[in-house]
């Protein structure tokens, strides 16, 4: 039943009024009876006294009843206040447990239900968080969460073990990890809201890490460090091995080629001359393969010291075109240079010449039927984009993502026949990367191919920091 408290108070009031009425009625009746019998002055005084007593008694009764009712309500409200205090202090197991069905009882029941739901949800969240923590702690990778203002929020066990100085929660991340590449990735992930990947080499001496920093929505970023020291070591061993073998093969191959050529000069037509010609051709092929392997191993290792300087794109394109003009003419291919880009690029001219040479050489090898090759460079934001376009048979789209892998050829037989090693584009990719650029290919079967690469614009004098 609704409005119970109101009815209780109303009942109390009615009880008081009834009590007063009864007492006054009894008293007045008695007084009147007395006064009828004996209408004296003393009687009036007695009536007055009796009335006074009766009123006092009624008032006392009413006060006692009101006190009991008020105490009961106050006690119940105090239980609600205590409940609210416990909830505020984080004790979600607090309950009021008021059994009555008046308004206060209804409020108490509703609050109990809310607390129960809250406790259940909190339990689920905590269980999820604990599972996540177990998962992150059992990972092989180190994980570090950073708040939006660059403070360390959380680190998994691997991360804590990794840092000799330990991880201080709440301290600036720069005091915990001092690697500039790692810090840049974190800052960029927070500022741009995008995932950043980088390599960090100065977190621990002699160890290499791949770092992925991903933003957490509105709450900083989380960085995952993957230890690639062993992979790097194996890669280095592989590169060194390839470089050493290539180097060792150079001298015997030159010798075979030299002797084959000498013998060819003094051998007349016949099977012997054919055999010698095969020996010479294969020696030349192996020599160019070892040469390319050596170049690739050097560029890949990052040990090549590039000499970067500002160069005009037009100059590099003209130089490359000059080297191939004669070859193009002999194949009846038009070599056209177009250079709208005016800004200089920061480049090692010899290395970029090798990239352009590999691309033009490919265009002549695989697309000379197109009759024309266009070289050019155009502005593209903070870079200049160079391109080599041919009008040959083109490359099917499924090959495009793999073209720059070492030894990847679309048509193996054709490549081998034309003296290709399958390393030209891989070398070009590493040289462009070392310049801070990217290389890609656009092509469609029957519509020719365009190979494009970017080089960063050289800072204008006065801009250099
Ligand atoms: P290769 O020494 O075989 O030329 P590259 O790495 O230079 O090796 O090229 C890889 C493969 O890409 C080539 O074997 C060829 O199939 C394909 N390719 C490269 N350039 C072109 C082009 N301009 N037109 C068609 N195919 C090409």
Image (cartoon, helix red, strand yellow):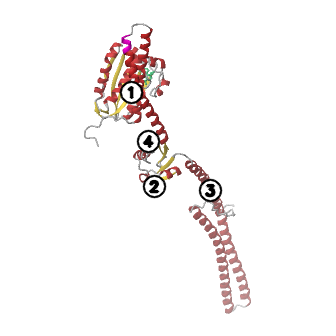
Of mark 4 and mark 3, the one earlier in the sequence is 3
Percent of width and height locating residue 194: 45, 41
- Helix, strand or loop at mark 4: strand
Residue identifier under label 2: 165
The residues colored magenta run 262-266
Residue 332 x %, y %: 35, 12
Give whichever of 39, 282 is nearer the camera: 282
Q: Nearer the viewer, mark 2 or mark 1?
A: 2
**Marked residue nearer the N-terminal end (4 or 2):** 2
Q: Report if the CB atoms under discs 2 and 3 are less than 8 Å apart.
A: no
User: Is mark 1 in CB contact (under 8 Å) with mark 3?
Assistant: no
Residue sticking out furthest to the left: 462
Locate residue 27 relative to residue 121 in the image: left or right. right
Q: Is mark 3 within 8 Å of ligand 1?
A: no
Of residue 304 and residue 405, the one placed in the foreground of this image is: 304
- The residues bearing labels 4 and 1 have C-alpha atoms spaced at a distance of 26 Å
- Quarter of the image holding residue 318? top left
Q: Which residue is mark 1?
A: 452
x, y percent for residue 29: 72, 82
Question: First in sequence: mark 1 or mark 3?
Answer: 3
**Mark 3: secondary structure:** helix
Which residue is disc 3 drawn over?
119
- From this view, report whether residue 39 is shown above or below residue 197: below
Is residue 12 depicted above or below 252 in this figure? below
Foreground of the two, 373 or 361: 361
- 12 above or below 386? below
Where 292 sits versus 151, above or below?
above
- At horizontal 44% and vertical 56% (from top left) the residue drawn is 171
Observer able to see residue 20: yes
């Amino acid at each position: 039943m609704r409005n119970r408290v109101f009815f209780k108070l109303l009942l109390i009031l009615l009880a008081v009024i009834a009590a007063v009425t009864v007492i006054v009625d009894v008293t007045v009746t008695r007084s009147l009876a007395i006064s009828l019998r004996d209408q004296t002055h003393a009687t009036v005084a007695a009536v007055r006294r009796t009335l006074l007593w009766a009123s006092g008694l009624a008032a006392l009764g009413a006060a006692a009843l009101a006190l009991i009712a008020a105490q009961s309500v106050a006690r119940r409200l105090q239980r609600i206040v205590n409940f609210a205090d416990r909830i505020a202090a984080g004790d979600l197991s607090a309950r009021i447990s008021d059994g009555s069905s008046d308004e206060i009882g209804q409020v108490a029941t509703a609050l109990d239900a809310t607390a129960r739901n809250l406790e259940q949800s909190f339990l689920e969240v905590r269980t999820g968080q604990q599972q996540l923590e177990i998962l992150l702690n059992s990972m092989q990778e180190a994980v570090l969460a950073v708040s939006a203002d660059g403070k360390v929020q959380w680190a998994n066990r691997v991360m804590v073990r990794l840092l000799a100085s330990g991880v201080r929660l709440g301290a600036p991340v720069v005091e915990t990890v001092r690697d500039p590449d790692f810090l840049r990735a974190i800052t960029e992930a927070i500022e741009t809201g995008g995932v950043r990947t980088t390599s960090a080499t100065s977190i621990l001496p002699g160890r290499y890490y791949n770092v992925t920093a991903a933003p957490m929505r509105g709450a900083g970023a989380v960085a995952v460090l993957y230890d690639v020291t062993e992979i790097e070591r194996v890669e280095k061993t592989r590169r060194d091995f390839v470089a050493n073998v290539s180097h060792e093969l150079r001298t015997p191959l030159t010798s075979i080629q030299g002797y084959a050529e000498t013998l060819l000069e003094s051998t007349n037509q016949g099977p012997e001359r054919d055999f010698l010609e095969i020996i010479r051709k294969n020696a030349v092929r192996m020599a160019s393969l070892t040469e390319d392997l050596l170049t690739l191993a050097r560029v890949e290792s990052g040990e090549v010291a590039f000499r970067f300087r500002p160069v005009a794109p037009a100059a590099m394109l003209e130089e490359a075109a000059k080297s191939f003009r004669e070859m193009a003419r002999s194949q009846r291919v038009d070599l056209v240079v177009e250079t709208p880009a005016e800004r200089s690029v920061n480049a090692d001219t010899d290395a970029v010449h090798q990239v352009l040479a590999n691309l033009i050489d490919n265009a002549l090898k695989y697309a000379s039927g197109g009759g024309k090759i266009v070289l050019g460079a155009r502005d593209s934001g903070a870079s200049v984009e160079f391109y080599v376009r041919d009008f040959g048979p083109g490359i099917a789209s499924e090959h495009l993502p793999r073209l720059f892998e070492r030894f990847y050829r679309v048509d193996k037989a054709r490549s081998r026949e034309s003296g290709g090693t399958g390393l030209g584009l891989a070398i070009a990719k590493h040289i462009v990367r070392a310049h801070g650029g990217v290389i890609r290919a656009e092509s469609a079967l029957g519509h020719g191919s365009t190979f494009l690469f970017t080089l960063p614009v050289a800072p204008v004098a006065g801009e250099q920091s």
